[in-house]
Image (cartoon, helix red, strand yellow):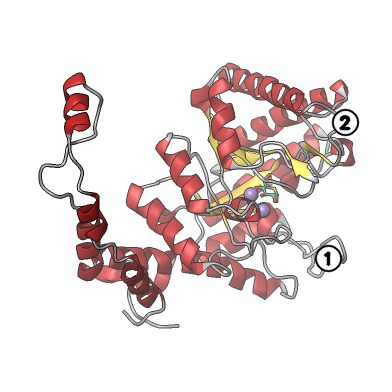
Amino acid sequence: MSKKNGKNGKQANYEPKPEDKFSFGLWTLANRGRDPFGDAVRPTFPPNDIVQVLGEIGAWGVNLHDNDLVPIDATPKERDKIVREFRAACNESGVVVPMATVSLFFHPVFRDGAFTANDPEVRAYALQKTMRAMDLGAELGAKIFVLWGGREGVETDACRRADEAVKRLREAVNYLCEYNIAQKYGYRFAMEAKPNEPRGDIYMATTGHYLGFIPTLDHPEMVGVNPEFAHETMAGLNFMHGVAQAWEAGKLFHIDLNDQYPGRYDQDLRFGSANPKSAFWLVKFLEDVGYDGPRHFDAHAYRTENCEGVKDFARGCMRTYLILKEKAERWNEDREIQAILKEISAAAPNVPKNGRYSEKGAQSLLAHGFDKDAMLRKRLPYELLDQLTVDLLLGVR
Ligand code: GLT
Ligand code: MN
Ligand code: MN
């Protein structure tokens, strides 16, 4: 590893600091490499040990589903003991719990979905389980509650009308917002989209779907999104664009960082390992706008790894983020790049302004004569701009 410091010597050797707000889900380090074709390759990694490792490698936070920590059939007494010991482990390692979530996908009872399931009893159980997961998260200090509807979908559209699913989801989220208010938990809900897997099709396939859904809720201010790199990439989308739209709408409450080759199963690869250039634009966006929420890595180590490799994986996520952050600073300070940026958005003199509509402005716009040939002569050196970016990323600039 190079001993070279980050810009201004700020972050020596890309070591993570608490202010980077790097977090990992318990389920990410606990991932044992099980897949639809093969069994676990790594031993169980108990939650309290995970927290210790996270502290050791410089992560700031740990996130969890209810059942990552408390088994689904634990008695209240067992639950309280587990939670007490987990809190102690967090305190000892200096690791915080910024986000909590609920598993509404693992238990077979959710085979037809949770909030959108056809059986009203399943829908009621899903609400109860989520309220209890909110209680758990609140006890651990979490202020963000993620809802990923992994099983909210179909293999056949014969089973329900898709707009009925939207209505059921709305009813459930409204209910949970009221519970949040009644309990004074102060949560912000972050809705996580995914197009498919484990269901053939999942409702609310993209972050954009959720941005359309949220304003229809009773408490839209309490609900935002948790976009995941892999999920938008599975849908063939430009992840940063979705994140930017969420940010611009004031809805980027949380983010799931990982990587993914398009057109494949849900890979949850180490951040920046498959599409470093897309990861660069994302990091540059988050840093440029001053996103100050958690930078959560929702990924897991290759199935070929052992326990040491799991640490390599986690360190790698954070390291790549910090390298890309440094590259983004260099990009912003690069004179040639900045000169091109200035050139491409400069206007010729006497161009009518768009801005807000006014009758006078509209009259002068309608009266203006545009010289299309002159407009076409303007240089747009995007090839050069992109090559300078590539040079910078590949380390020759
Ligand atoms: C699951 C999923 C993730 C979600 C988690 C939160 S669980 O691992 O693949 O994308 O963020 O429920
Ligand atoms: Mn995720
Ligand atoms: Mn995923």
Secondary element at tag 2: loop
Q: In this image, 263 relative to 247: left or right?
A: right
Residue 168: x and y, percent?
73, 23
Cβ–Cβ under 8 Å for marks 1 and 2: no
Q: Is residue 142 visible?
A: no
Marks 1 and 2 sit apart, C-alpha to C-alpha, by 33 Å
Q: Return the residue at label 1.
A: 40
Question: Label 1 crowding class (10 Å Cα cut-off): few <14, some 14-19, many 20+?
Answer: few
Question: In the picture provided, is 221 more to the left or to the right than 384?
Answer: right
Note whether 63 is above or below 77 in the view shown: below
Say which of 76 and 246 sits in front: 246
Quarter of the image that includes the N terminus: bottom left
Query: Identity of the amino acid at label 2?
Result: Cys
The image position of residue 388, as x and y in percent, is 33, 73
Q: Does residue 348 appear to the left or right of 267 in the view shown?
A: left
Residue type at mark 1: give it: Ala
| Label whose residue precedes the other's in the sequence (1 or 2) | 1
Does the beta carbon at disc 1 come under 8 Å from ligand 1?
Answer: no
Foreground residue, 273 or 28?
273
Could you tell me which residue is drawn at 57 percent across and 17 percent down? 218
**In this rendering, the label closer to the viewer, 1 or 2:** 2
Q: Position of residue 299 (x, y in %)?
A: 64, 59
Which quadrant of the figure has residue 230?
bottom right
User: Which residue is depicted at the point 67% across and 45% down?
Assistant: 194
Residue drawn at the location 70% of the way across and 21% of the way down: 167
Query: Which class describes the residues within 10 Å of circle 2: few (<14), some (14-19), or many (20+)?
Result: few
Residue 24 appears anywhere in the view: yes
Element at label 1: loop
- Identify the residue under disc 2: 159
Residue 181 placement (x, y as % from top left): 56, 19
